[in-house]
Amino acid sequence: MRVTVNDEARDTAAPTLAALLEELGVAHEPAVAAAVDGEVIPRSRWSAQALMNGTSILVIRAAQGG
C-alpha cells in the first residue's frame, strides 16, 4: 500500500503503525511520537492502529541540543 510519512510517499506492507515504525527503525526510540491523519496516537495504541492506502503519518523524533 502507499502511505505518506512526513510528507513523503512510501510503499509499505506494514499493516499497523507499530509495524511501520519498526520498518522505519524508530519504534524502540524513547522520544518518538506519531500521528495518523492528524490524530496523535499514544504508544500504547500503535499496535492496534491499522494503516490503509492513503494514510498520512507524521513521525516526530525529539532531539536534544543546545
Image (cartoon, grey):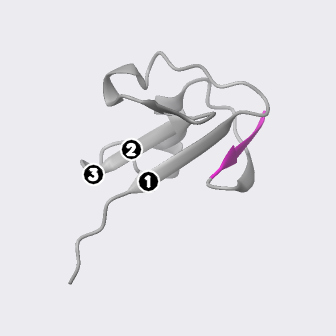
Pinpoint residue 11: horizontal percent, then vertical percent.
75, 44
For the C terminus, the image quarter is bottom left
Q: Is residue 51 left or right of residue 3?
A: left
Range of the magenta residues? 1-5
Crowdedness of circle 1 by 10 Å Cα count: few (<14), some, many (20+)?
A: few
The residue carrying mark 3 is 31
Picture coordinates of residue 45 (x, y %)?
Answer: 39, 20
Q: Is residue 25 above or below residue 47?
A: below
Between the C-alphas of marks 3 and 2, the distance is 7 Å
Relative horizontal placement of residue 59, taking residue 56 as reference (left or right): left
Amino acid marked by disc 2: Ala
Q: Residue 4 colored magenta? A: yes
Quarter of the image for residue 50 reads top right
Graded by Cα atoms within 10 Å as few (under 14), some (14 to 19) or many (20 or more), the crowding at tag 3 reads few
Q: Are marks 3 and 2 in contact (CB under 8 Å)?
A: yes
Q: CA distance from mark 1 to mark 2?
A: 5 Å
Q: Earlier in the sequence, mark 1 or mark 2?
A: 2
Query: Which quarter of the image is occupied by the N terminus?
Result: top right
Label 2 CA crowd tier, 10 Å (few <14, some 14–19, many 20+)? some
Contact between marks 1 and 2 (CB within 8 A): the answer is yes
Name which residue lies at 47% across and 15% down.
48
Name the residue carrying label 2: 33
Task: Give the labeled residue for mark 1.
Answer: 60
Upstream in the sequence, badge 3 or badge 1?
A: 3
Secondary structure state at the residue bearing disc 3: loop
Q: Secondary structure at mark 2?
A: strand
Q: Is residue 37 magenta?
A: no
What secondary structure predominates along the stretch shown in magenta? strand
Report the front residue among 16 and 60.
60
| Above-or-below relation of 63 to 18 | below
